[in-house]
Amino acid sequence: MASFGLTLSRSCIYRKTFDSLSCLLAVSILTISTCGCSNPYSAYYQDLTNGQQVVGAKNMQPETVDVRVVQGGNVDEDTKGMMREGYIVIGVSAFNAGAVNPQGAKRQAQKVGAEVVIVYNQYTNTVSGVMPFQQPTTQTSTTYHSGSVYGYGGGMATFSGTSQTTTYGSQTTYIPYNVDRYDYLATYWTKAGQMRLGVRVEELTDEMRQRLKTNKGVYVTVVVKRSPAFAADVIEGDIITKIDGTEVLDGPDFVQLINRYREKEFTLTIYRDGQYMEKHIPVSGS
């Protein structure tokens, strides 16, 4: 799976978007206690930039200072929508917990230099049990005393009285509880810089290979709005077979070919609706 129209390093970040999100949703999400982290969005953040500096970096250009927090719906559709608008994913947070303050996602987005954070949560289960609660107890007992005292001269005296003794202990009460738990996911986005092409592509499916009678090529899954590919009317679903007459072998090969033409015009050969056609891509900015 690959994405192009960026530098090679950004292509790697772009490519990781679907790979990482699919992996996070397909396997068991990290589990934390409801009080285990002050900000689980930060504690369980995974960087997808290979350590690149985002804030102020030339290859990523944040448009705004404030972070926009968006409630997500469908992960795949939201991801494609952000890519079409020219955004690039820089990281994700994923965990399972009880109630979590959504402001934690915004704070983490500000920390990593993201412009937009999309948050998701889905109920998973309710944890039930009992919690022991100990309270101190005291018990006071009273002792009564009485008697007679006889003297040597035959005299007699009587006495009576009381004394108290306090015993300290504890009493355990078991309190039932129910805690609803959720899977949480947050994706962090920033605006990408100028794109040489502006598409995301994937490897050919078996059906496509049979139709084209070849293993070579890639097909377009996302076209970024206002990009060179968008202006040239490359559309999602097109199969790219050549760049300036050179056959495209697969996704990584396509990345290398695109990078050769960063300052040059070139022609894409694409297959659409049973026909081959060419799309001219001018030098960026021309």
Image (cartoon, rainbow, N blue to C red):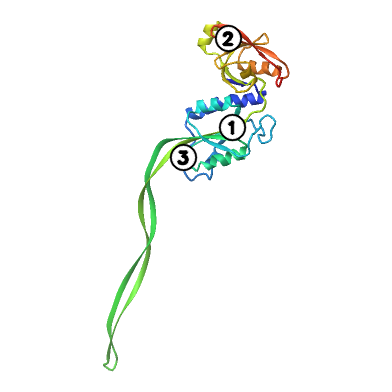
- Disc 3 packing (10 Å; few <14; some 14–19; many ≥20): many
Residue under circle 2? 271
- Disc 2 packing (10 Å; few <14; some 14–19; many ≥20): some
Q: Secondary structure at mark 3?
A: strand
- First of labels 2, 3 by sequence position: 3
Mark toward the viewer: 2 or 3: 2
Q: Which mark is residue 38?
A: none
Q: Secondary structure at mark 1?
A: strand
Q: CA distance from mark 2 to mark 3?
A: 47 Å
Residue under circle 1? 189
x then y, percent, for residue 90: 60, 31
- Disc 1 packing (10 Å; few <14; some 14–19; many ≥20): many
Q: CA distance from mark 3 to mark 1?
A: 23 Å
Task: Find residue 140 and report its image quarter.
Answer: bottom left
Q: CA distance from mark 1 to mark 2?
A: 32 Å
x then y, percent, for residue 13: 61, 27
On screen, residue 104 versus residue 144, left or right, reads right
Q: Secondary structure at mark 2?
A: strand
**Proximity of marks 3 and 1: CB atoms separated by less than 8 Å:** no
Q: Residue type at mark 3: give it.
A: Ala
Please say if 69 is above or below 282: below
- First of labels 1, 2 by sequence position: 1
Please say if 62 is above or below 35: above
Please identify the quadrant where the C terminus is shown: top right
Towards the viewer: 124 or 262: 262
Q: Residue type at mark 2: give it.
A: Tyr
Residue under circle 3? 97
